Image (spheres, grey):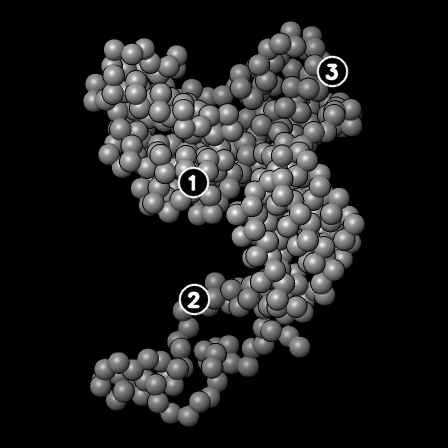
Amino acid sequence: MAFSTPPLAERLRPQTLDDYIGQDHLVAPGKPLYMAIHNNSIPSMILWGPPGVGKTTLARIIANTTRKPFFALSAVAAGKTEMKQIVEQLKTPALPLFADARQGKDGSAILFLDEIHRFNKAQQDYLLPFVEDGTLTLIGATTENPSFEVISALLSRLQIFVLRSLSMDDLRRIVQRGAQMIGVELADESLNFLAEYANGDARASLNLLDNAMRLYAPNGGTIRLNDLKETLQSRLLRYDKGGEEHYNTISAFIKSMRAGQVDAALYYLARMIDAGEDPRFIARRMVIFASEDVGMALPTALVVANEVFRAVEAVGLPEAQINLAHGVAYLASAPKDRRAYDAYFAALEDVKKHGNLEVPLFLRNAPTQLMKELGYGSGPAGEFLPAALAGKKYFGP
């Protein structure tokens, strides 16, 4: 098999919903995306989920079924100029459409924007009027929380569909389909290993299978567990903002700050910045860390982390790396106290376990006379927690 062939994940990409695996809460018969695709009534939307769960594939399935022109751009490489070209083509039917677009009858089109979180505010502002007037039906794909990355005016005009990590059964089916495509057999332990290795990301398991085939079974045969492990050891790790090394590095960064290892934390910060990581992603994790790990030991840590985030937004790279380094050294050196974090999630467990327990009468609001007569808002202060949780302690000394 020639090495110039497209990656297995691309060759295996489903073309219809019938072949799509996973995300049953969205694409099973009667579910929202199923109905939108089958009725050819596509709303502007954001597909939000971790890498390798089918965001781009869903967009391509829409492209295969829609009767509107379909344009696909990556926010990493495209910008305002490319969007302006699309709008001009729609308003001037005589102009030739992009290669993968089809002429529609109502002058509107679907725009798939991969990694929409990489578009800045000005680029998103430019899109807004065309989404609002229906010229463009926008489908954005992102691994980042759209509440942070998409401007509120645009977000309010989009439906958010959350895609979940693929289950082990989903991954086994996908991997088995990939093995059949490239003509190899998988031992049972190999199939399970590939599904577990993926951690919900089908692309990761298919890439590993593809590489193992090239090394150990280029002419067919059986891929065994040791073949997969040897392939992992021999591969050249590179930083991919949607891949394994991204998660390994951010994990090492957080754990180094948690352990008070300033030098290690600064090293992993430098590694991420040098690899092109979005500095806002790093700064957001620092804001979370300030409350989750530093917490009550040094409450001003949250103030510092927030100011670092603001500085990163205002200054941008390359200067913002100095702000990040300052914040990392501060947070890593700070004392740690996770009591507020642990206490909150312990309380949340009780909320899920017990449901809406009755609030004690003396704590209730009493805006009407009837409520006052029933004892709302009156009586001596007593146990503030509901009766079923009386005396419960979440926040320890």
Q: Is 343 placed above or below 134 here?
A: below
Residue 13's x, y, as percent? 49, 21
First reached walking from the N terminus: tag 2 or tag 1: 1
Regarding mark 3 in the picture, which secondary structure is present there?
helix
**Tag nearer the camera, 2 or 1:** 1
Mark 2 neighbour class, 10 Å CA radius: few under 14, some 14 to 19, many 20 or more: few
- The label number, if any, that marks residue 132 in the structure image: none
Q: Nearer the viewer, residue 232 or 191?
A: 232
**Distance of mark 3 from mark 1, alpha carbons?**
45 Å
Residue shown at the point (66%, 39%) measured from the top left: 273
**Disc 3 packing (10 Å; few <14; some 14–19; many ≥20):** few
Q: Quadrant of the N terminus?
A: top right
For badge 2, the amino acid type reads: Gly
For marks 2 and 3, give the CA distance: 55 Å
**124 above or below 176?**
below
Secondary structure of the residue carrying tag 2 is: loop
**Residue that badge 1 annotates:** 121
**Which quarter of the rendered picture does the C terminus lie within?**
bottom right
Q: Which residue is mark 2?
A: 355
Q: Position of residue 114 (x, y in %)?
A: 46, 30
Q: Residue 215 shows which numbered tag? A: 3
Name the residue at 51% across, 64% down. 348
Q: Is residue 362 above or below residue 84?
A: below
Q: Nearer the viewer, residue 153 or 147?
A: 153
Q: Quadrant of residue 186?
A: top right
Name the side, left or right, on which 313 lies relative to 336: left
Nearest to viewer (mark 3 / mark 1): 1
Residue drawn at (35%, 34%) of the image: 126
Residue 365 visible in the current orientation:
yes
Q: Earlier in the sequence, mark 2 or mark 3?
A: 3
Whole-angstrom CA distance, mark 2 to mark 1, is: 41 Å
